[in-house]
Amino acid sequence: MAHSVYKYRTGEAYPHCYKYPQVALTADCVTFSFDGKNLYVLLIRRGGEPFKGCWAFPGGFVNPDETAEEGARRELREETSLEAEYFEQIKVFSAPDRDPRQRTVTVPFIVLSSHTNVVASDDAAQAKWFPVDQLPDLAFDHKQIFEEARAALKRSLNFNPVAYYLLPQRFTMPQLQRLHEIILDCKFDRRNFARKMNSLSILEEEERSQGMPRRIASIFSFKKDKLLLP
Amino acid sequence: MAHSVYKYRTGEAYPHCYKYPQVALTADCVTFSFDGKNLYVLLIRRGGEPFKGCWAFPGGFVNPDETAEEGARRELREETSLEAEYFEQIKVFSAPDRDPRQRTVTVPFIVLSSHTNVVASDDAAQAKWFPVDQLPDLAFDHKQIFEEARAALKRSLNFNPVAYYLLPQRFTMPQLQRLHEIILDCKFDRRNFARKMNSLSILEEEERSQGMPRRIASIFSFKKDKLLLP
DNA sequence: CCAAAAGTGTTAACCCTACACCCATGT
DNA sequence: ACATGGGTGTAGGGTTAACACTTTTGG
């Protein structure tokens, strides 16, 4: 499809001319992970202007032939080499002056990933997991985007098997509980929590190996067939 | 702020030229109302191309100095003369070919309004409330947008006092119940529903006037101070 | 040996659901 | 007179929340 309706001037290197006022469209990834103890979010150090050297969420301009989500997946891959399954779009940020360069509207996504190593590339000078309660100053309005994402993740936990994407395939009940407690910012009683999880019948318990002492937590996994993959 | 970073060619009437590929940004309003019996959604008949003569949601291009929500409010006002309080952003639609003219990304909003008369103007040849189960064919991907909005409204009812914006200031319990039933697509027991609503203590019951027969339903209103206005 | 982590059951309060009858009105 | 709409209370089942002790290991 034609995204540029008028031809550019001879010798002009910037061919993006349009009949109606336009905006630049970006997609940003608020990527969470969990190491069994803490919740992390993935940041990159910007290699280019504006906000060069600042920490920010991975993301960038959406290409003419991509949806916002496709753009988000590509940018995350390019900048951090991370491929994730779960992408959930949250509210766009469209304040007219949120980008000093030009009018830019961003579509932010919550991304859920396992806590794997990341490598910076492309525009990113560095990529690093930060504990969610120890974030540095962020570029643009990314602090606000983070707050939105955090709140949306909390709401999402009611409906989506968020833990499935954040935990390793095999995990313990205390790990699952800690994850829920961090996301919801509250405490649960161990017994009540386990009862509730078991009553949902989405978990599978692994056989305890012979003579495994009680001190070691039992292993669980998600029943694949019970998940409504979004 | 500069939304056009490069000057236009002499004699060129379309000054919107940019360094990066751009998209057109629109905002669309999925406006609901309730007349005590049915749930309605507001459509306009398009006065211009593309999809001229088709029914569609009110909406249009977001101006360079507006947020998406400001654009949505303005377009709704211009096309239907409706002013509403409640705007809730839902997921953007960004398929590259969703608009035959050019790359267009739309930010749709759920709008809640009282069931008042509307008058078409501006781009709109006609404006009309349609019962939600009797929608005509819609322009663009507006059918999909409607489905999303309908589902989001259902979810929203759990958290937001949606009924406050859809009902007149004074209403009866059966009206409130019908509204919930239509939105959630289910049936409630009268007694259980009233008990539940009363237990939330967000409703105020008006005094029954002297000798008012029991056949007439009691009047309720929302306690203003209990609403967390979004 | 002590602190920290994990396993295990019971009870009371609360909430949700289901259900039936009466009264007043309009047709 | 009858169909319709609205008002009212109770009992049972399920869910949630609160609660303490034992075992094992690592420091």
Image (cartoon, coloured by chain):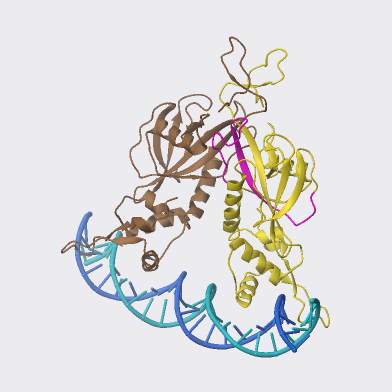
Chain colours: A yellow, B brown, C blue, D cyan
Q: State the image quarter where residue B209 is shown.
A: bottom left
Please tell me which residue lies in front, B86 or D19: D19
Q: Is residue A85 left or right of residue B220?
A: right
**Residue most extreme to the left:** B211
Q: In this view, does A222 lie above or below A43?
A: below
Residue occupying the point 65% across, 26% down: A3
Is the N terminus of chain B in the top left, top right, bottom left or bottom right quadrant? top right
**Residue most extreme to the top:** B11
The overriding secondary structure of the stretch rendered in magenta is loop
Please tell me which residue lies in front, A9 or A87: A9
Q: Is residue B118 left or right of residue D27?
A: left
Query: Is residue B94 in view?
Result: yes
Q: In this view, does B124 lie above or below A183?
A: above
Q: Is residue A180 left or right of residue B48?
A: right
Residue B130: give x, y in percent of width and height. 41, 41
Please tell me which residue lies in front, A190 or B2: B2
Residue occupying the point 72% across, 51% down: A85
Q: State the image quarter where residue A162 is shown.
A: bottom right
Q: Is residue A50 left or right of residue B211?
A: right
Residue occupying the point 36% across, 57% down: B225
Q: Is residue B85 magenta?
A: no
Residues rendered magenta in the picture: A90-118
